[in-house]
Amino acid sequence: MNPTDIQVVDLGPDGWLLQDTAVGPRPVPANRLDDHFTEVLAPPAWATDLLVYVHGWQTIPRSALDAVRRLVALAADRHDPERYPQLKSWRPWTVLVRWPSRSLPSLGGYRRIRDRAHAMSTEGHAARVIGRLLGYLNAERADPATPPVLANRDGQYLHLVGHSFGCRFLCEAVQWAAGAPLTLGWSTPEPTGRPFTVDSMLLLQMAASRDAFSMMFTALGEAPLRGPVVATYSQHDRATGFWHLRAEKRAGIGYAGIGTAPAPVSAIRMRAPGEPYPLAALDHRFVSVDASDVFVHGHGPGGAHSDHLRPESAHLLLSLADYCR
């Protein structure tokens, strides 16, 4: 894997985009946001898929980069056109979104980062900045919904992957662009006149209450998504179980799965890398994936909260990419 396959975007505590300068990180002026993306984030013609990954709680910048590299490497190891027949090539180009997520490993620390993640998206600028990022990538990619182009005759597919509190940023950004209904391999109708369209959305151990999709992210039922919102959970996840239960008096999605949502929720188990996902298992607006037999290892207060970098996760990501075609 080439290190240049992964680009990094940093957000400040207010959710605004930062750029490196001679005197340290500084906010990108609002009127230069799109110009900045053009200068530093040009999707290469060789890429078959564009991934946007947002990390979660207790992640330092280097660890965030290591995590996304590991996930991409796991997917590269698993890719096989015989196993994913529509996914003949898998050459992802990844944008990592980093944000200040460190705190004390305590109930107070969990609440602090929960509140920061919420404030960065609702009172701050994270949802708008990530939404603008997705809009830029959508405009620059070879769109599978348009006639073929010489750069990539099959188009470039856009996937979102979040972990922990990072899932909230993605949900807020996609909800920001929600409007009229909306594919390619999926059964949901195609959108028109939207800022961007996302082909799949994988939320790994989401740090939000089980009813978040019916209470906080209500527009996701009609969001610009060609594919499903897929969320994993494990009962070995103490961060979204033990800590989340004490912080919000309710279990989190990462511990107990999606509860209520604006559309019916399909409940399935996480499958082994050699076991295919039928289209019928994933072709729903919301899919809750029980990974309790897979995400089992962990240490410290989070339990198995960060045990998501596994071949099974890569298999799920590749299956979603395959069914987008």
Image (tube, rainbow, N blue to C red):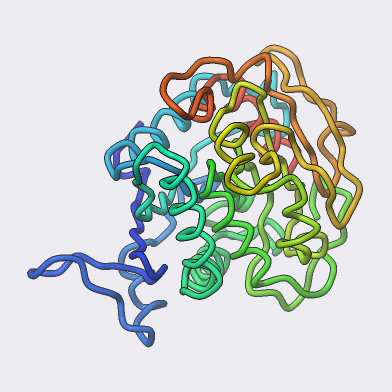
Residue at position x 50%, y 65% in the image? 130
**Relative image position of residue 174 (x, y in whole percent):** 64, 63
Residue 45 horizontal side relative to residue 251, left or right: left
Quarter of the rendering containing residue 235? top right
**Relative image position of residue 90 (x, y in whole percent):** 55, 34
Where 31 sits versus 119, above or below? Answer: below
Residue at position x 31%, y 69% in the image? 39
**Relative image position of residue 104 (x, y in whole percent):** 34, 42
Residue 119 visible (yes or no): yes
Residue at position x 29%, y 39% in the image? 3
Looking at the figure, which quarter contains the N terminus?
Answer: top left
Q: Nearer the viewer, residue 272 or 58?
A: 58
Quarter of the rendering containing residue 191? bottom right
Residue at position x 63%, y 31% in the image? 318
Looking at the figure, which quarter contains the C terminus?
Answer: top right
Residue 325 visible (yes or no): no
Q: How many marks?
A: 0
**Relative image position of residue 246 (x, y in whole percent):** 60, 41
Residue at the left extreme? 22
Where 106 sits versus 297, above or below? Answer: below
Residue 191 horizontal side relative to residue 164, left or right: right
Quarter of the rendering containing residue 59? top left
